Image (tube, grey):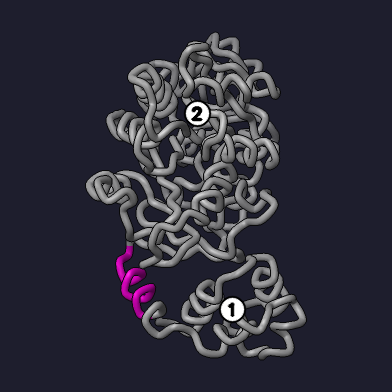
Amino acid sequence: MDPETLALLTLVLAGGATAPRRLLLETHGSAASALAAGPRAWRAVGLDDKRCARLRTPSVTALARSEAWLADPRRHLLDWQHADYPALLRQIASPPLALFVEGDADLLWHPGIAVVGSRSPSAGGRDNAHAFARALAAAGLVVFSGMAAGVDAAAHEAALAVRDGRTVAVVGTGPDIAYPAGHAGLRERLAAQGAVVSEFPPGTEARAGHFPSRNRLLAGLSLGTLVIEAAERSGALITARQASEAGREVFAVPGSIHNPMARGCHRLIRDGAALAERPQEVIDGVSAVAGALAQALRQRLAASPERPHQGACPHPLPPGADYQCLWKALGHDPTGMDALIARTRLTAAELSSMLLVMELDGQVAVEHGRYSRRS
């Protein structure tokens, strides 16, 4: 393992509050320099004696397990200073020091919706989770969820069933652990066809305190959070609150007044969440945040070498007639939004979401608010 990765893992394994370790990393420019700075510098940023001891003497077993896990080329460690650290996650109150990702790390930059809800949904709630997630994935959005039983699993399964559907599991364990254990097969499919992401190092078992922390990542990676069914006190409501605090949209699907699993959604709606009866209402509702993500992506791409593309369309278009229509409406000369609305008869919100997806996939170039095909 190279010295910088080893030093970064040592910082991650020290545990505790992330802010002091982020400050240490920023102050010294690299993880190796941060470790070399020594105890006086560590204490200066707020690290206590326990964290300093772990920096001096990291767990050999934990380091070896993380090193072995990272040996697979589909596994990644994205630290706070990494160019691919997700832009939306940087905006939350307590972003993680680093992310362990198995699968397609680029999906963390794609526009997506967190779909959350009860671990024991009604049959109707499960159907709603499947229908909304399927429609969101078909529209080209990533379906983020937590790989839990119930609504989470239904959302992941629905997105995986869509041709070219994208879905990411944000977990409260190490990225190598299936929780619940019965979801081992689902975890493997998510890692192969989407991504599994965690702030906890490989080998970390499920602990109750990890899941509220997981929920903040789920809310932070998403343009908005959709709650399908939730009791009045549930983890899904924590995710929704954290999404709201991060300036993201919150949507709730209403249910029967006789269904206790609908009460959490009704409470969210009373408190200002958007009532969602159709997937398109969710897509339309996140266009403003999608625009901010697009700007961050443009800055990221501008700082990176241009990726080569071949053929009329660099990658397969997302499924759906609307994408085909938009592709035909785009030319090699930059085209403004008003012209695209006139050519496609789609709304500005619909086009914004679709164009962002196509930009992330390398199909569309954007300059001064005008769009063209990438050659």
Q: Which residue is mark 2?
A: 230
Residue 301 image label: none
User: Is disc 1 placed on a helix, strand or loop?
Assistant: helix
Give x and y (percent) for residue 212. Answer: 55, 49
Residue 137 occupies quadrant: top left
Judged from the image, the secondary structure of the residue bearing numbered disc 2 is loop
Q: Amino acid at mark 1?
A: Ala
Judging depth in this view, the residue of 249 and 4 nearest the camera is: 249
Alpha carbon separation for disc pair 1 and 2: 41 Å
Q: Which residue is mark 1?
A: 31
Q: Is residue 72 magenta?
A: yes
Tally the numbered discs.
2
On the rendered structure, is 40 left or right of 278? right
Residue 154 in view, yes or no: yes
Magenta part of the chain:
64-73
Horizontal arrangement in the rendering, residue 152 relative to residue 84 (left or right): left
